[in-house]
Structures are given as structure tokens and as C-alpha cells.
Amino acid sequence: QKEVEQNSGPLSVPEGAIASLNCTYSDRGSQSFFWYRQYSGKSPELIMFIYSNGDKEDGRFTAQLNKASQYVSLLIRDSQPSDSATYLCAAHTSGGSYIPTFGRGTSLIVHP
Amino acid sequence: EAGVAQSPRYKIIEKRQSVAFWCNPISGHATLYWYQQILGQGPKLLIQFQNNGVVDDSQLPKDRFSAERLKGVDSTLKIQPAKLEDSAVYLCASSSLDSSYNSPLHFGNGTRLTVT
């Protein structure tokens, strides 16, 4: 059973702070990892993805991957109230084709 | 480009009734997914198609759920008969590049199903 684990939160941070969201996965065959943001009542939308060990930066967002520890994280710098949402981590695992498995998501609240 | 289209947006039915959802993926996207998202949980994959073949349907409750993707484009998901625990948002998504490891999913607006 492929599992992707996330703390459901809520994670509460003040405006301007760094928010750190974490995700672990059980299947070592997972090859790539995606972070999606989901506003209440809306569908998930892609933030960024990572497939190599290390850091990947995109604007205020940094994804970090450590395959040895089976750990993925997303850092949001200079958090804004508009970043308040649920953040979903997804792992793509190869079984012939790549099958995405989602975690339950972490709720982030950025307060002014 | 036009996004993933889903209909209906909302549906309310009584238990034991049947319901069908429709999805039209982004043009040219080979892979189509149906996810079930219960309130407070992450999306759970029900079925994944590549073109018109099934890649994974291990979590699809096949005694009541069925899905098809005719001609490798549009897809329908059906529930018959519905149970109370089927109340959820049903998300359709598509991806390009034949489900390459770095292909993100593009989601439709979802269908919110309420079973009473």
C-alpha cells in the first residue's frame, strides 16, 4: 500500500514568516513529488514539483527532497494571508505508468 | 488552453439511486484520472486511464462504481446504487506526456455529490 503522510494541521504562521510543510512517503519506488494548493471549495492547483534530491526554488516557494529519508518539504517564504489554504503532497510512483498518490493535506493559516 | 471540464457541478440524490459524472480533459492529454475527495481528506484515486486503457482501478468499488473512457477522450463515472458514504467531491484530472513522472495533474472544478 503506497502511503503519503502529512500532518493535517492547521499550521498557523504570522504574515511575513516562513511556513514549512512536510510530507513523508512509504514507497521507495516513488520518483517525483508534487505540491498542490487547494483553497476551500476549489480544486487543487499545481505549485511545483521536484524529482532530484536537494532544493528547488520557484519564487517564494522552495521544495526540498531527501530520498534517503523519504521526505519532501515545501517552504513558503514571506507568507501572505492569500497563502492560507490546504497544501497537498503527491507522489508519482512507477507501475508501468506513473500513478499519483496524494496525502491528506496540511491546512495553512497565515494571520495578519 | 481550455481546462478540464466536468459536469454537473452539484448533485443531490437519495441512497440507492444512480448518478453519472462527465469529464472532458484538456485537448491532447493522454491520461485521465478520477479522484474521490471526502471532506477533510486528500484525493483518493478511483481510476486512471491512459488513452482508453485502464492503468489502475485498484481502489474503485467495482460492485457499485464503473467508469469508461470512450475513444480516449471524454470519460464518465457512474455510481449505482449510491450509498451515504459516497458523499464527496469527485475530481477529474488529466495530464500530458503519457503520464510521465514529471507530468502535473490539471484538475476540473469537481462535482459535489450529496447522498441523502
Image (cartoon, rainbow, N blue to C red):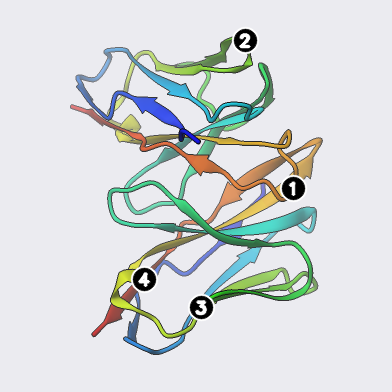
Task: Kindly identify which residue carries mark 3.
Answer: A60
Mark 4 is on which residue type?
A: Asp
Q: Compare residues A90 and A28 and report the one nearer the observer.
A: A90
Residue drawn at (48%, 23%), measured in percent from left and top? B24
Query: Dot 3 falls on which chain?
Result: A
Mark 1 is on which residue type?
A: Tyr
Task: Kindly identify which residue carries mark 1.
Answer: B101
List x then y, in percent, for residue B48.
61, 30
Q: CA distance from mark 2 to mark 1?
A: 24 Å
Task: Kindly identify which residue carries mark 2.
Answer: B71
Task: Kindly identify which residue carries mark 4.
Answer: A83
Mark 3 is on which residue type?
A: Arg
2 and 4 marks on the same chain:
no
Query: Dot 1 falls on which chain?
Result: B
Label 1 CA crowd tier, 10 Å (few <14, some 14–19, many 20+): many
* Element assignment for label 3: loop
